[in-house]
Image (cartoon, helix red, strand yellow):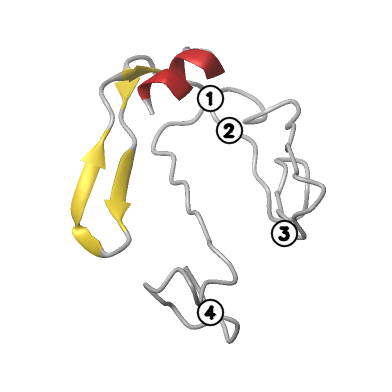
Amino acid sequence: MYDVNGVLTTDSALMTSTKFTVEVLKRAAGPSFANVALLVDPSNTSTMTLIKPTDVGGSTSSLPLTGYYNINCPDPLNPTAIATTGDIGWNWWGGSIEHKI
């Protein structure tokens, strides 16, 4: 969470923006996604920026690996405390991944 000056804060009352970083350790063949749907609350003025694989700064993926991966979610108030999902198959669909998360 960041305040109005872009300074990291743990006080949700001062929060004006939040950044999420997703690090993928395995790549899938071709673009990472074909399309993305963002659901936006009309009364919310927040914006989301997304770099597609075809955009400048984006990158396509290499051949996929098989197996499973896990998502680690560090606690913003205690970065040493990390919640980890169970195994997620590299070929699972969105609903199954959301259920694990």
Q: CA distance from mark 2 to mark 3?
A: 29 Å
In the picture as drawn, the residue positioned furthest to the bottom comes out as: 5
Mark 3–mark 1 contact, CB under 8 Å?
Answer: no
Residue of label 1: 28
Q: Nearer the viewer, residue 30 or 78?
A: 78
Q: CA distance from mark 4 to mark 1?
A: 36 Å
Does 37 appear above or below 100? Answer: below
Q: Position of residue 73 (x, y in %)?
A: 32, 45
Specify which label sits upstream in the sequence, 1 or 2: 1
Q: Amino acid at mark 1?
A: Ala
Q: Amino acid at mark 3?
A: Ser
Q: Nearer the viewer, residue 63 or 38?
A: 38
Q: Position of residue 43 (x, y in %)?
A: 79, 53
Residue of label 4: 3
Picture quarter with the C terminus: top left
Mark 4–mark 1 contact, CB under 8 Å?
Answer: no
Residue placed at 32% from the left, 61% from the top? 76
Q: Is residue 34 left or right of residue 29?
A: right
Specify which label sits upstream in the sequence, 4 or 1: 4
Q: Nearer the viewer, residue 67 or 81?
A: 81
Does 14 appear above or below 89? Answer: below
Q: In what element is the residue under mark 2?
A: loop
The disc placed on residue 46 is: 3
Q: Of the residues tagged 2 and 3, which is closer to the observer?
A: 3
Q: CA distance from mark 4 to mark 2?
A: 34 Å
Specify which label sits upstream in the sequence, 3 or 4: 4
Residue placed at 48% from the left, 53% from the top? 21
Mark 1–mark 2 contact, CB under 8 Å?
Answer: yes
Residue of label 2: 61
Q: CA distance from mark 1 to mark 2?
A: 5 Å
Q: In what element is the residue under mark 4?
A: loop
